[in-house]
Image (cartoon, rainbow, N blue to C red):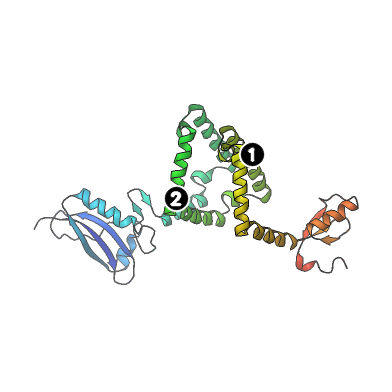
Amino acid sequence: MQPRIYTYKITFEEVSYYYYGSHKERKYNEYYMGSPVTHKWMWDFYTPKKQILEIFNSREDANIIENRLIKSVLDDKLCLNKNCGGIISSDMCRRGIETQIENKLGLFSRSKKQIKIDGDKGRETQKRLGIGFYNLPIEMRKENGKKLGQKNVETGHIQNLGEKYGKLCYENNLGIFGLSKEERKENSSKGGKVSGNEAYKNKTGIHSFGEQQRIDIGKKSGNKNKETGHIQELGKKQSKQLNSKKWMCLITNYVSTSGPLTIYQKSRGIDTSLRVEVDLLNNTNINE
């Protein structure tokens, strides 16, 4: 009998974990139970069983099918494969980032200021040399953005990735979650001004429309909001949220909601910034 080239699946008698692979025999029916790295201990601790799935004429064909098998289950918690053709599972990505955070390696070895400076330098270099993103005409950037956005909507890839890494950043106080409220507000203001100026200069976004087109878009949007009641409902929620918070004047200790307290302070010549938010449940007897 001739040596075979095949894909296989390893399972275990005691647990539900599994592992895919491919193998080229040196001699027919030689003993081979896979070549795991990350979870090699399972092969020693449990009882592995091998199932030959398909036999091929070339190693290249076997590798193609092996990659298809692994890619479809790479993020399955029961799958012991953690790498497929250079693609790493989400679990391994998470572990890698946690290790970098813990040991201050890679990106996490630098301060936020250093990261920002390096990022700004990279963007300025690309602009100056007209490379990367800045090598493309504006119309092509728009078209590529639309195609990519549509593809992400269809696959849900970016949404899923955002959920995973958003949770990771939240748990480790990274990115926006590592900023104070004041820092977030300042960054939002700066980002809005920069993106607004860029949109105006390049005639993108709302600035890509003529005055009449903007008017027509505004009317359509207004009519749609009337039909759905979206803006009214949002206004009610925001109003309820605003009125659920009470503030105390630091001069007179008078407590009220934001609007009435502003009127109260102005009528008495008190600076409206001299106030502090108080807990609604503890306010009821303050004015008595």
* Label 1 with label 2: CB-CB less than 8 Å: no
**In the figure, is residue 8 to the left or right of 193?**
left
Q: Amino acid at mark 2?
A: Asn
Q: Is residue 203 above or below residue 54?
A: above
Is any part of residue 36 visible from this angle?
Answer: no
User: Residue 43: x, y in percent?
Assistant: 30, 64
Q: Which is more toward the observer, 34 or 127?
A: 127
Q: Residue at x 17, y 57 (%)?
A: 55
Q: Earlier in the sequence, mark 1 or mark 2?
A: 2
Q: Residue at x 68, y 58 (%)?
A: 235
Would you name the residue on which mark 2 appears?
Answer: 152
Q: In the figure, residue 76 lies in which quadrant?
A: bottom left
Q: Residues within 10 Å of mark 1 (few under 14, many from 20)?
A: few
**In the figure, is residue 92 to the left or right of 262?**
left
Q: Which mark is residue 201?
A: none
Q: Residue at x 67, y 51 (%)?
A: 181
Q: Which is more toward the observer, 50 or 218?
A: 218
* Extreme residue toward the top, this view: 129
* Extreme residue toward the right, this view: 268
Would you name the residue on which mark 1 appears?
Answer: 193
**CA–CA distance between discs 1 and 2?**
27 Å
Where is the N terminus found, in terms of image quarters?
Answer: bottom left
Q: Residues within 10 Å of mark 2 (few under 14, many from 20)?
A: few
User: Residue 124: x, y in percent?
Assistant: 54, 31
Q: Amino acid at mark 1?
A: Lys
**In the figure, is residue 278 to the left or right of 170?**
right
Q: In the figure, residue 10 lies in which quadrant?
A: bottom left
User: Residue 4: x, y in percent?
Assistant: 15, 56
Q: Which is more toward the observer, 65 or 196?
A: 196
**In the figure, is residue 48 to the left or right of 283?**
left
